[in-house]
Image (spheres, rainbow, N blue to C red):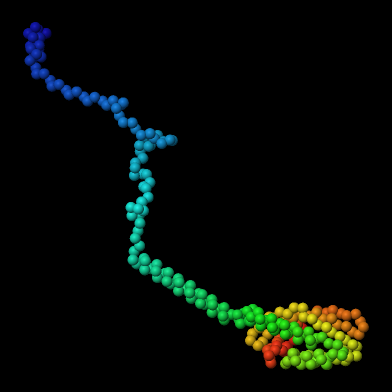
Amino acid sequence: MTRLSLRMRLRDAVDAPDAPDEPDAPDAPDARDAPDAPDAPDGQSTEDAQAVSPADEDPLPPDPADGAGTTTPRPWLRHTLTALVCTALLLTGSGFLYAAHGLRSDPSAENRALTDAEATTKVAGDVGNALARIFSYTPEGLAATERSADAVLAGKAARQYAELIDRIREDITQQGVTLSTQPVRTGVLELDGDQARLLVFLDQISRRGTDRPTSVAAQLTVTARWERDQWRIVDIRAR
């Protein structure tokens, strides 16, 4: 290269305008000045804890004092509930009335043996005493026994007893047969108005002449009817 060319290059370099200065780059933030990240819960990484947003958390229930979460019943709902309650009360009242009518119309309710203790005791006592009188006799007292039978027996029972005495009358007088009867238990099965049906258990002791006495148990179904201010036996059936 010639000296002339070198001088020209040097002159161009000196005369060229200065290039603008580039702005200084901002200083990088110091890691020590950054805010501390919140601690992650146990068993969860920091990245996972930061990924949970507040929207993912369960909202708190509304405070009743603030009026939030309460619903005012609508007018038509109140009317409907009132109508349902009234209907239920009416149906319940009808059920009680029906049950009461059923109790009154039940045949068992007409059976005074279940409800009238005084009348039940009266008919049981009268029938038990009557059976003890007509089924207790001796050869000397047979006539008195028959008079008692006329006072406490009626209808079919009176005819049954007369036939029985006619069959055993000769044995009673000739062989000296005696009979003693005691009612052990008398139960009133039905008591309706002036009619009663009873179940009677009897203990009977019979003796023939000088023989040893014999004990016999008897069970009778008796029908009695209220006549002339007393209970009279109208039917007797051995069980």
Q: Is residue 117 left or right of residue 13?
A: right
Does residue 51 show up?
yes
Residue 80: name its quadrant: bottom left
- Asked if residue 17 is positioned above or below residue 123 in the image, the reply reads above
State the image coordinates of residue 166 (x, y, percent, origin top left).
83, 92
Which sits in the foreground, 49 or 71? 71
Report x, y in % for residue 120: 67, 81
Name the residue rendered at 70%, 88% in the picture. Answer: 231
Q: Is residue 79 above or below residue 222?
A: above
In the rendered view, does 82 fall on the left or right side of 194? left
The number of numbered badges drawn on the structure is 0
Examine the rendering and report whether any part of residue 222 can be seen: no
Quadrant of the rendering where the N terminus is positioned: top left
Q: Quadrant of residue 149 in the image?
A: bottom right
Which residue is depicted at the point 68% across and 90% down? Answer: 229
Residue that appears at 69% across and 84% down: 123
- Residue appearing at x 9%, y 13% in the figure: 14
158 up-or-down from 114: above or below: below
Residue 75 picture location, percent across and down: 33, 66
Residue nearer the viewer, 234 or 40: 234
Task: Name the residue nearer the viewer: 175 or 182.
Answer: 182
Task: Measuring from the top left, give residue 98's x and y in whole percent.
Answer: 52, 77
Q: In which quarter of the image is the C terminus?
A: bottom right
* Left or right: 177 in relation to 32: right
**Which is more toward the observer, 5 or 220?**
220
Kindly give the residue lying farthest to the top in the view shown: 3
